[in-house]
Image (cartoon, rainbow, N blue to C red):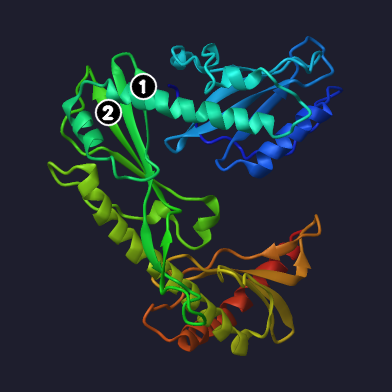
Amino acid sequence: MAMVEQPRPLSSPSTSGTAMVPSWLNAQLQYLRMHSPVPLKVENLRSGARNGHILDRFSLFVPCCLSYVKWDVVYNGNDTRVAPDIIFGADDETFQPLMDDSELSPCYYLRDWTVADPTRLLKLILLIRGLYLQYQRKKVEEVSDERVRFEMSTMAAIQGLEMCVTTISEGMEEVNFAFPLVLEMENPHSATNSQSSSITCSDISLQVKFPVRGGQSGGGAPQLKLVAPEGMRDVFDVDDVKLPVWPEHMCLVEYKPTLELTLQQQVREARASVRLRRNFVEALFPFFGHPLEVDTLYYRKASILTSFGVFTFLVHFVLPIQFPKIQPSFTFQSSQHFDARGKPLVSRLYQDYPWSPRWEASEMAQRIFDFVAEECLAFKRSCGDILSQR
């Protein structure tokens, strides 16, 4: 099995030169994009004929163990009665789900194929993906390493567990495990209704890799990686998490609760930071004036139009997730000085002003205001100098 980096998000099918996506394929891809319970990615729409005018095949990236495997889906654009063929990776040559003609196989499902049903492609891919996960589990079960076998024997109760074997180089493999972490979080709506005071969050998953060389994995700590949806980064960035130490003789089932408790605390702190960022942004208003634009969801950004004397300019604030431990940064943008292309002149990034995370929000805003009152004069002079040199 060859894993690939996460591809670009699926985009709406479009034309390529004079070639076009037929309406029946467009409908199937749109249904796949809108209704897939897993993040399938489509790339490289192309024609099977030289100088063909019909795009009838594409590459499909299918999630497995928090990475992706690449399959190719091949239609016959000249005969829509023919079901598509699926070409799997070179490392998966023993995976042949379309050779099975039992009632539970995809081959049986393809017998009454019709492009008139836009749901068929997604149903087919999900069925094959389920069989592929079973295929990879069997490959992991065949690994002779005692440590891997022991880890597998303890994981029966883990919900959403996926596993696979990837070939790194000749004689070198990785056994991968992936599963969602379960975090008990405070319910933000419990104070206003009869709902439970806590909710279960499983948006963050753990990927674990055990290197296996010559059939042996060794006794060191495995490679650990946290994975979370892209949209979560505005509240909590898993790349900033310092993972608990993996002690000697630790196993994954014992490590999992410790990691979940660590993440639980850090996610709670990140959510509390949203409230602190809001208090800070609102504390800026009495000093700088009402903002032109504010991120009112996570309070990561705010832009305020202000003036000192006759100089009017914008202050663009960016607040880090780790606020107030890490102070905001900001830039000035003149509303009176423009470069040769007509774009407003912008200052350097400011992060070198007095700051303490222990101050009240009002004092933080006051200190920044005092700093800006002095620094904006230097920015105004630099704008004048730039214009005088043109």
| Mark 1 nearby-residue class (10 Å; few <14, some 14–19, many ≥20) | some
Which residue shows up at 23% across the image and 46% down it? 253
Image vertical order of residue 375 relative to residue 132, above or below: below
Disc number at residue 129? none
Disc number at residue 211? 2
Q: With 246 as the anchor, is 181 left or right in this view? A: right
**Residues at marks 2 and 1, CA–CA distance in whole angstroms:** 9 Å
Nearest the viewer among 389 and 17 is 17
| Mark 2 nearby-residue class (10 Å; few <14, some 14–19, many ≥20) | many
Image vertical order of residue 216 relative to residue 294, above or below: above
Q: Which comes sooner in the sequence, label 2 or label 1?
A: 1
Disc number at residue 168? 1
Q: With 209 as the anchor, is 274 left or right in this view? A: right
Which residue shows up at 28% across the image and 20% down it? 142
Q: Do the residues labelled 2 and 1 touch (CB within 8 Å)?
A: yes
Image vertical order of residue 364 relative to residue 23, above or below: below
The residue type indicated by label 2 comes to: Pro
Where's residue 166, x and y in %?
38, 24
Q: Which residue lies furthest to the top in this view?
A: 50
Where's residue 197, x and y in %?
41, 74
Q: Is mark 1 on a helix, strand or loop?
A: strand
Where's residue 270, x and y in %?
42, 67
Visible residue check, residue 3:
no
Nearest the viewer among 291 and 163 is 163
The residue type indicated by label 1 comes to: Ile
Which residue shows up at 57% across the image and 35% down it? 7
Quadrant including the N terminus: top left
